[in-house]
Amino acid sequence: MSADQEDPPAGAPLTPQRAFVDAVPHNRALGMEVVSMDRSGAVFRLPYRAELVGNPETGVLHGGVVTALLDACSGAAVFASLPRLAPIATLDLRVDFLRAAVPGRELLAHATCYRLTRNVAFTRAVAYHDDRDAPIAASVGTFMLGTRRGAGRPAGGGSR
C-alpha cells in the first residue's frame, strides 16, 4: 500500500501484506511498500526521502534504513513460505554493503526464503535500484518461527 492509497476499511482482515505496513510502526514510518509477496519471495519498495539520508553531504540513504528494508522484506518472504500464519522473529541478519545507493532514487528489495525447518527459516535478500544483479546490499538471515509473547520466560519473570 503506498502513502497515496486509501486506508483499508475498519475491521478489514489483516493480510500479511498489510501487516508489514500497518502493524509494524517502524516499517510504516520509513514508508515501506509491499510490491509483491508470494511463495517465491517478496519485493518491497522504499521511496527516497531526505529524512532517511545518513550523510547530508552525499544524500545517500542511511545504512540502517537499508538494513531495515532487507529485514522487513526477508520477514515477508518467510511469512509467504509458511503453510499458515505464525509469529516470527529475526534471529540473525548479516548485511554486506556493496555500494552506495544513488541519492534521490527509490530502493527496492527482493527476498526469498530458501529453507524452512520446524523452528527456523533461512533467507537471502538484495537491495537494488533497477537490477537485482547489481545490488547495493545483500543479506542472509535466520528467523525464529512460532514465537509467542512471554513464551520461554522462566518463572518469576527473570531472564536467561
Image: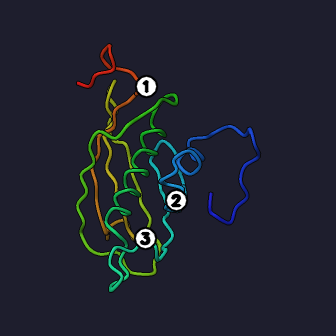
Where is residue 44? Give x, y as percent: 48, 58
- Badge 2 is on which residue? 29
How far apart marks 2 and 3 lie (CA) works out to 10 Å
Per the image, label 1 sits on a secondary structure element best described as: loop
Left or right of 11: which side holds 119?
left
Residue type indicated by callout 2: Ala
Per the image, label 3 sits on a secondary structure element best described as: helix
Q: Please report the residue visible at 43 percent of the width from the left and 70 percent of the height from the top.
A: 52
Q: What is the quadrant of the C terminus in the image?
A: top left
Q: Measured along the vertical axis of the image, is residue 86 above or below residue 101?
A: above
How far apart marks 2 and 1 lie (CA) works out to 25 Å
Q: Please report the residue visible at 32 percent of the width from the left and 13 percent of the height from the top.
A: 155
First along the sequence among labels 2 and 1: 2
Q: Residue 148 carries which label?
A: 1
Residue type indicated by callout 3: Leu
Where is residue 21? Give x, y as percent: 56, 51
